[in-house]
Image (tube, rainbow, N blue to C red):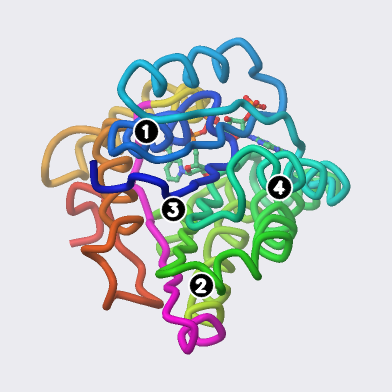
Amino acid sequence: MKMDDRTCLITGSGRGIGRGIAEHLGQEGANVVVNYRSSESSALEATEAIEASGGRAIAAQADVTDRDDVDAMRERIHDEFGPLDVLVNNAGITKDTRFTEMTRDEWDQVMNVNLGGTFNCTQAFYDDIRNADEGRLINISSIVGKQGNFGQANYATAKSGLFGFTRTMALELANGGSTANCVAPGFTRTDMLETVPERVQEKIVAEIPLGRFAEIEDIAATVRFLASEESSYITGEVLDVNGGIDL
Ligand code: NAP
């Protein structure tokens, strides 16, 4: 078991990509915190799957936009497992509409979860990650942060903001031996992709050289590598996992 005794928090991991990451880390023997905002039953299913595969897991409710929630989750994690070794900022939302019709509230909601949640969790667990033996900060961005996307001015802005945040954290964490990296998935089969109209999905697949959307496992396996000791000398990087869509 490569991740024995490493404690990992994955935000928004009751379902989707986050759940896949949680289960992959659990299979390596990690102590996994499955954070959820509203998907309690699937978060509990994820903890059962992790326990069955040899890891230890708890489900922790917290809205990442609420610093009090995040601080309460930290107390619980410290009581249960001690300090964190790996933080994966995965929780994310979209509120898509063309820019001229986008309300300030739609802009703010996307910033609050995708960037504000990352701020709250990283600050709450910064000392843990910095003081860990090879701590890991992993931020889940998107191909949309690199390319932009029609109807996603809010989401593209938030996701490209994670690139600058990751590089800065890489610099600030480096002299303690911890790393910060970003994963930029391409279009991945989850509930989030289901919100994209079918005709748009067909157009996107036609532009992917590998000819298919990403599966959750494609992203989770990349995060598992970045969380492991095998990635010790990689920091401040963006790993694209997108089937070659930007070639
Ligand atoms: P998803 O299926 O829509 O799931 C979103 C997850 O985020 C859920 O677990 C949700 O928790 C959680 N979440 C949302 N707001 C939250 C909050 N305020 N506090 C805590 N958790 C919150 O999305 P996904 O496709 O798995 O995406 C995961 C990440 O990958 C996101 O950052 C997304 O931007 C990124 N990404 C996705 C794709 C894609 O094509 N799917 C591509 C590139 C990047 P609850 O269900 O408990 O509310």
Q: Nearer the viewer, residue 95 or 138?
A: 138
Amino acid type for the residue under numbered disc 1? Gly
Queried on whether the Cβ of the residue with tag 3 lies below 8 angstroms from ligand 1, the answer reads yes
Residue under label 2, please give it.
166
Closer to the camera in the image, 173 or 131: 131
Count neighbours of disc 4 (C-alpha within 10 A) and say few if under 14, some if 14 to 19, many if 20 or more: many
Please report whichever mark, 2 or 3, sits nearer to the chain's N-terminal start: 3
Disc 2 vs disc 4: Cβ atoms closer than 8 Å? no
Bounds of the magenta segment: 171-189
Quarter of the C terminus within the rendering: bottom left
Q: Amino acid at mark 3?
A: Ser
Q: Kindly report the distance in space between the C-alpha atoms of the residues bearing marks 4 and 1.
A: 25 Å
Is label 4 within 8 A of ligand 1 (CB to nearest ligand atom)? Answer: yes
- Tag in front: 1 or 2: 1
The question of residue 174 being in magenta is answered with yes
Residues packed near mark 1 inside 10 Å, few (<14), some (14 to 19) or many (20 plus): many
Alpha-carbon distance for marks 2 and 4? 16 Å
Give the residue type at disc 4: Val
- Mark toward the start of the polypeptide (1 vs 2): 1
Taking 237 as reference, is 215 left or right? left
How packed mark 3 is, by other alpha carbons closer than 10 Å (few <14, some 14-19, many 20 or more), is many
Q: Element type at marker 2?
A: helix
For badge 2, the amino acid type reads Thr
Sequence-earlier tag: 3 or 1: 1
Name the disc covering residue 113, or none: 4
Q: Nearer the viewer, mark 3 or mark 1?
A: 1
Q: Name which residue lies at 64% across and 51% down.
A: 114
Where does label 3 land, which residue? 142
Q: CA distance from mark 1 to mark 2?
A: 24 Å
The quarter holding residue 43 reads top right
Disc 4 element: helix
Residue 26 circle label: 1
